[in-house]
Amino acid sequence: MALGYKHGVYTNERATSLVPMTTTDSGLIVAFGTAPVHLASAPAAVNTPVLCYSYKEAVAALGYSDDWEKYTLAEVIKTHFALFNMAPIILVNVLDPAKHKKDVQDKQTAMAGGIVIMTEPVLLDTLKVKLTAAHQELVKGTDYTAAYDDEGRVIITPIAGKGIPSGQTELYLSYTMLDPAAVKPADIIGGIDTVTNRTEGLELIDEVFPRFGLVPGIIIAPGWSHDVTVAAVMKAKEHNICGHFNAISICDIPTKEVKAYTAASKWKNDKNFADKDCILCWPKVKLGNEKYHLSTQIASLMNRTDSQHDNVPYYSPSNKYLQADGACLADGTEIFTNPAQAAYLNGQGIVTALNFIGGWKLWGNRTTAYPSNTDVKDNFINNRRMINWVGNTLVTTFWSKIDEPTNKRLIETVVDSANIWLNGLTAKGALLGGRVEFREDENTTTELMDGIIRFHVYLTPPASARDIEFVMEYDTGYISALFS
């Protein structure tokens, strides 16, 4: 309240002239695929981004199965939480029990040891049990119990003295079960459902920030990204997320089709994989008897690498340890590439796995833009991630300044705040240098009158030391040491 007459000492406050930079997650993974929702204890809605900070939380919402061919998100859950111990992650399941299903009617099923064991992915709330096909339906909880065991099987157990006689040898079962094979690339791609007006599939990437306040950093769809139509949409969704943010995508070359490293480059070129924000992988990797898409491991490896450097993505994931004891094809055939063969793949813009010194590591620094695009901001993985991350951070930090008066104070606040932040990144080695300028030649009078302000950001992420050479020379001068 304003005072007309003052007598005394007064204080007032003014907004700080420097704005603290927001924290933007450099590698938040958004994974699309299929999940065994019939095994979930608290199933999440289909085609809904689910934010998970723990293995337990992910399994409760989406279920878990070792059948990764059918349930691709289970591989992501195992990799991210169990192998790399990273969090969080966002998972999007497109396997819809209302659409991707099979109905079974009055299936004659034998009892063994007084129980029925079912291996099908049954939706328990649809299960109906009869003594014969013509018999009245039995009552769950009164005549029998039905539940999943730890191996993902449905166990039907008669309740003693109730509707199932002790000598019964078979039951007739009707139920609906999930049909993962009915999921097609179009389900991963998604779009807008014309009936429900709901967003589905990869289109949901734009809902991540409004839902959770977290910026997507990495898009994956293991088991699906080898499909050119899925990959094309993944590459399209990397850019202008919510109209403001940028991410990278990681795709796989299908090892069922491409079985030799020499064929990987041809596949890449034939399928038109050339994008500055896309990483392409060949082959798969294995750990024990489990086979992993390389894209799945790379995404979590980036998270681990970032976490070791203050969540700033200036370190390349190349030459960092995978959680693997081998490389392989889809059929399990082991692959052993030597450094020259791995370098050939890298030179074609493909990353791979290499066991040379120190165990199995990721090998390769190039995005799929290489070799056709030689701009270092586009073809080095860590450069792309740094530029995306810096841009995303500037957006989230200075969004609060939108609609403030276009005056000297606003311009100085943005320039000073951003430069202090970039200086800090330079001091830690994340940048070789960086600065923000408000340039008169880039801000026309008419645009400033219209409220349009342009700031020029200069930054130089350090290139990955991909080639270290020692020049060796025989020096005859040291022969004199014989006479010392």
Image: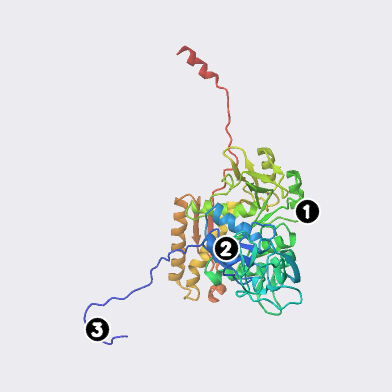
Residue at 49% from the left image edge and 57% from the top image edge: 435
Dot 3: few (<14), some (14–19), or many (≥20) neighbours within 10 Å?
Answer: few
Please name the amino acid that badge 3 sits on: Lys
Please name the amino acid that badge 1 sits on: Asp
Where 359 falls versus 390 (above or below)?
above
Q: Please name the residue that numbered disc 3 is placed on.
A: 6
CA separation in Å, label 3 and label 1: 79 Å
Where 415 falls versus 258 (above or below)?
below
Residue 162: image x %, image y %? Answer: 63, 74
Front residue of 74/32: it is 74
Front residue of 272/431: it is 272
Left or right relative to 347: residue 13: left
Asked whether disc 3 touches disc 2, contact meaning CB atoms under 8 Å apart, the reply is no
Locate the N terminus and report the quarter of the image it occupies. Answer: bottom left
- Of labels 1 and 2, earlier in sequence is 2
Q: Quadrant of residue 276?
A: bottom right
Residue 226: image x %, image y %? Answer: 72, 56
Front residue of 155/275: it is 155
User: Could you say whether the residue bearing mark 3 is in a helix, strand or loop?
Assistant: loop
User: Could you say whether the residue bearing mark 1 is in a helix, strand or loop?
Assistant: helix
User: Could you say whether the residue bearing mark 2 is in a helix, strand or loop?
Assistant: helix
CA separation in Å, label 3 and label 2: 65 Å
Left or right relative to 339: residue 316: left
- Whether residue 82 is visible, yes or no, is yes
Q: Please name the residue that numbered disc 2 is placed on.
A: 59
Q: Nearer the viewer, mark 3 or mark 1?
A: 1
Q: Please name the residue that numbered disc 1 is placed on.
A: 270
Dot 2: few (<14), some (14–19), or many (≥20) neighbours within 10 Å?
Answer: many
Locate the C terminus and report the quarter of the image it occupies. Answer: top left
